[in-house]
Image (tube, grey):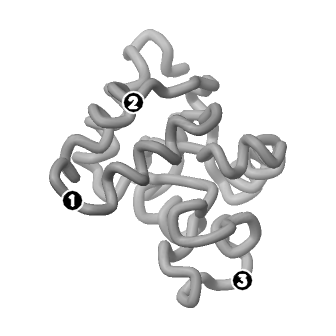
Amino acid sequence: MLQHTLAIIKPDATQRHLVGEILACMEKNGFTIKALKMLQLTPEQAEGFYAEHKGKDFLPPLIEFMVSGPVVVAVLEGENAVENYRELMGATKVADRKLGTIRKMYGLGLRENSVHGSDSEASAKREIAYFFTPNEIMN
């Protein structure tokens, strides 16, 4: 089933000039980039994006990290895009990351793991709408 999912290249990766390599990895693994932009998130934007985690201990340091440098947000299209992109990203926990995953290749740690991806089709729709208007997504 052809789906869209949201991908974010996080500040640890943009600051190390890895955007091109990570986007190429996405394309080499069968994803089509349907929309793309670089942003400097404000604390308010980061809080809004991560609103579902409000009140959790990890949220303030996550927001601080996400506003520490530019991010690249992309809409990826592909077969079972949500599940397949999550597999390509790799595990959040460093010890669980498999060879060939983006987080294994580029991640620095638990928070500085280089990429974000939607965790469900519903999340993908919400997250894409947070950053892109329908007119910004190529047909």
Q: Nearer the viewer, residue 63 or 99?
A: 63
Foreground label between 3 and 1: 1
| Dot 2 or dot 3, earlier in sequence | 2
**Residue 69 percent coordinates (x, y):** 63, 35
**Label 2: which residue?**
43
Q: Nearer the viewer, residue 105 or 138?
A: 105
Mark 3: few, some, or many residues within 10 Å (few <14, many ≥20)?
A: few
Mark 2: few, some, or many residues within 10 Å (few <14, many ≥20)?
A: some
Residue at 57% in and 54% down: 115
Pick out the residue farthest to the top.
Answer: 135
Residue 29, quarter of the rendered image: bottom right
Quick one: SS at disc 2? helix
Residue 36 higher or lower than 122, as above or below: above
Callouts 3 and 1 close, C-beta under 8 Å: no
Q: Amino acid at mark 1?
A: Lys
Residue at 72% in and 83% down: 99
**Label 1: which residue?**
56
123 lies left or right of 25: left
| Dot 3 or dot 1, earlier in sequence | 1
Specify the label residue 16 is tagged with: none
**Residue 6 percent coordinates (x, y):** 45, 42
Quick one: SS at disc 3? loop
Q: Nearer the viewer, residue 126 or 77?
A: 126
